[in-house]
Amino acid sequence: MISENRRNPRNRTLKGASICFDGGAIDCTVRNVSETGAALDVASPLGIPEEFVLVVPADGVRRRCRVVWRKEKRIGIAFDPADAP
């Protein structure tokens, strides 16, 4: 079994969401989430700004966040601690 060395455990999920920013919105899927961040599946990381608001309609969530890593079709985000629920 692989041990995770994360401060906050991730919870797997599969929820539709939107990356919202000045000038538009990009659809995405939340793949996992923790208290401090999440991993999002995207069609392409191109055009996604460093900071944006993540909207998850199913949960009524709107969180400011920033990109911490980018891969081909997935990005990792950290939630703004000042914007905690």
Image (cartoon, rainbow, N blue to C red):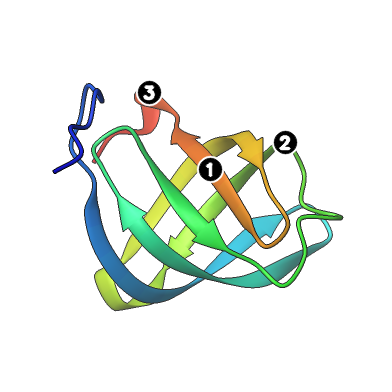
**Quadrant in which the N terminus is drawn:** top left
Mark 1: which amino acid?
Gly
Q: Residue at x 38, y 23 (%)?
A: 82
Badge 1 or badge 2: first in the primary sequence: 2
Badge 1 or badge 3: first in the primary sequence: 1
Q: Is residue 25 above or below residue 84?
A: below
Residue designated by label 2 = 50
Q: Which residue is outermost to the front?
A: 1
Q: Is residue 67 left or right of residue 34?
A: right
Q: Is residue 52 above or below residue 60?
A: above
What is the secondary structure assignment of the residue under circle 2?
loop
Q: Residue at x 51, y 40 (%)?
A: 77
Mark 3: which amino acid?
Ala
Q: Is residue 19 above or below residue 34?
A: below
Residue designated by label 1 = 76
Q: Is residue 8 left or right of residue 51?
A: left
**Quadrant in which the C terminus is drawn:** top left
Tag 3: Cα neighbours inside 10 Å, few (<14), some, or many (≥20)? few
